[in-house]
Amino acid sequence: MKWIIKEKPDQELSKFLSEKLNIPHIISQILINRNINTVESIKKFFNTKWDDLYDPFLMLDMDRAATRVVQAIERRERIFIHGDYDVDGITAVSILYLFLKRMGSDVFFYIPDRLKEGYGLSRLGVQKAYEVEARLLITADCGITNVEEVDLANKFGIDVIISDHHEEGEFLPSSYAILDPKRKGCNYPFKELSGVGVAFKLIHAVIKKLGIDLDILKEYLDLVALGSAADIVPLIDENRLLVKMGLEKINRRERIGIKALIESSGLSNRVIGTGQVVFILAPRINAVGRLGNAERAVRLLVTDSDQQAKNIANILEAENRNRKNIDDQTFNEAIEIIEKEFDSENDRALVLAKEGWHPGVIGIVASRIAERMYRPTIMIAIEDGIGRGSARSILNFDIYSAIRRCERYLLRFGGHKYAAGLMLEIGKIEKFKEDFKKIAYDLLKDEELVQRIIIDAEIELPQVNEELVGMLNRFAPFGPQNMRPVFLSRNLQVVGTPKVVGKDHLKFKVRQGGKVYEAIGFDLGSLHYRLCPGEENLNMVYVIEENFWNGKSRVQLRVKDLK
C-alpha cells in the first residue's frame, strides 16, 4: 500500500478562507485541494439549497420528452415503464410510477429477468408493452444502446422516451426522445447523474410543464438518494444536493417500504448515511434482482401497506443471505482459478470464466477480486454456450473503453468507466481474454497496479477536537469524489492491549499529546503484529467518524493502514 500525501495548497489562500469563513485551517486546505476554493463555492458546499437544482430543460430532448408525457397524462394514455434490475433502475422505475399514478395515469412497470433477458430494454419488455396496449414506453436507467428493441416498439406504434445515464453506443436508437446527460451534444451542466437522477429531472420538467407545485418533487428525494448512492456516482454538484436532501428524508422514516427495509436490516436505531445505503440497504434490494424477480423491490418502494412492506422486506433479507452464500462460493472458486493461472509479471488484468457461476452475483465478486488483486477484473458465467460477464475496474483504467476495443468478439456490452457488462459466445472467450489482457498490459503502468491511499492532510491527535469533527460531518454525504477526508498521524502510542474482534477487525487505542482515541481497522486483523503497546512509533492513516451506540455518540478513528 503506497501512501500519497496531497501537497499543501496556496497557504495565503488557505489562511484567507480560514479567517473569512471562520473555519479551521486544515478544513480550508482540504477544500482547496478539492477545487472548492472561493468564499462563494465553500458557502454553497456547506449550505446546499433546493434552488441550486439545474433547470431540467437544459438537457437535450427534455422539452420534447416532457411535452409527450404531459400529452399522455392528459389523454389518459397507458404508459409502460421499463427499468433495470439494480437499485438505480428500481428506484428510477419507482419514482416514475408513483408520480404518474399521482397524475392519474394508467401505468404499468416492468423489470426484465436478469438471467433470461439480460441488461437493458428487452424485446420481451417491448412485447409486454404492446400486449397491454401502451402508447408510451419510458425506460429507466437503460435504453441508450437498445437500437433493435426501440425499432420493435416503433413497429408496434409505441413512442419511446429513453431515460438513461450510460455511455451511448455507435448508433443511437430511433426513439421519440433520448434523455442522457452523457449523450453527445447534450449541454446539461452536470454529466454524472444516476439513472434515478435522470428520471427525477424528467418528473421535474413535467411538473414545470403542468404548472403545478414544485414541492411535489421533494416527495421522491429519498428514492433518488437510495438509487444514486447505491450506483456509486460521484457525490458532487447536483448529485450531492439530491443525496443530502434525500438522506434527510430517509432518516425521517416517511416511506413505508424504506422504513421496513431499515428495520429488517437491523438499522432501526441508526442514522442512515451513504455507508448504510451502499453496504446494507442496497445489497438487499439488489439481491432480488440478482437471484429472481426485481419487481418485488419496486412493490416494496411503492406500497402504502405496512404489512406488505414488512413481508417483502423479510423476503429481501432472506434473498440477501442466500446471495451472500453464493457470493462466497463463487469468490473462493475464482481465487482457485487465480492461484493456478495468474502471472504476476505479465497479467495486468484478470478475465475469469466458469460454467455454473450465477450471473446475478459475478459483479459483486468481480468487485471483491479487483479490490483484492488490484487488477481490472472481468468475471464470466457460462451457460448454454453463452458467457455473461461483469467487469469492475481500478483507478485510472477505463474498462468500458477497453471492452469496446474488443467489441468484435461480443454479442452486446454496456456500462461506464469503472463498471460494465457484456455477453459473448463461449468459443470467443479465450480470444477476448487474450486481447483484453493485452490492452490492459499496454495501458497500465506497473506503478498503477500498486494500491494507493491518498491522504488529505497530516495532523496530530490534539487537533481532533469538537470543532474539527463538526466541520468534517458537514462534508457529508460521502462518496466518489467527495470521500471522507483521510488523515495521517505519526509517532502515536498504542495504549493497552490491541484485540482482533468480530470477523478479523483490529481494535485498539492510541495516544498523542494527552489525547486518547479508540481506533478500529475493519478486515485489518492481519496487521496486529505492527502494533507495539507502549511504544510511540505508530504511523497511522485513518478517517474520523462519530460512532453512535445506545443513543450516545463518540469519536472513533477508522484505520485504513498503519506502519
Image (cartoon, rainbow, N blue to C red):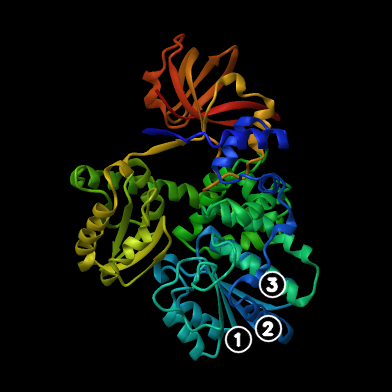
Residue type for callout 2: Ala
Q: Nearer the viewer, residue 51 or 33?
A: 33
Badge 1 marks a residue whose secondary structure is: loop
Mark 2–mark 3 contact, CB under 8 Å?
no
Residue 135, numbered circle: 1
Nearer-N-terminus badge (2/3): 2
Q: Residues within 10 Å of mark 2 (few under 14, many from 20)?
A: some
Q: Residue furthest front?
A: 12
Q: Is residue 330 left or right of residue 442?
A: right
Question: In the figure, residue 414 lies in which quadrant?
Answer: bottom left
Mark 1–mark 2 contact, CB under 8 Å?
yes
- Residue 477, compared with residue 552, is above or below; it is below
Q: Residue at x 48, y 14 (%)?
A: 494
Residue 205, numbered circle: 3
Image coordinates of residue 216 in percent, x first then y, are 76, 64
Question: In the figure, residue 30 lies in which quadrant?
Answer: top right
Nearer-N-terminus badge (1/3): 1
CA distance separating discs 2 and 3:
14 Å
Task: Tell me the quarter of the image containing the C terminus.
Answer: top left
Q: Residue at x 69, y 60 (%)?
A: 53
Image coordinates of residue 309 in percent, x first then y, are 65, 56
Q: Residues within 10 Å of mark 1 (few under 14, many from 20)?
A: some
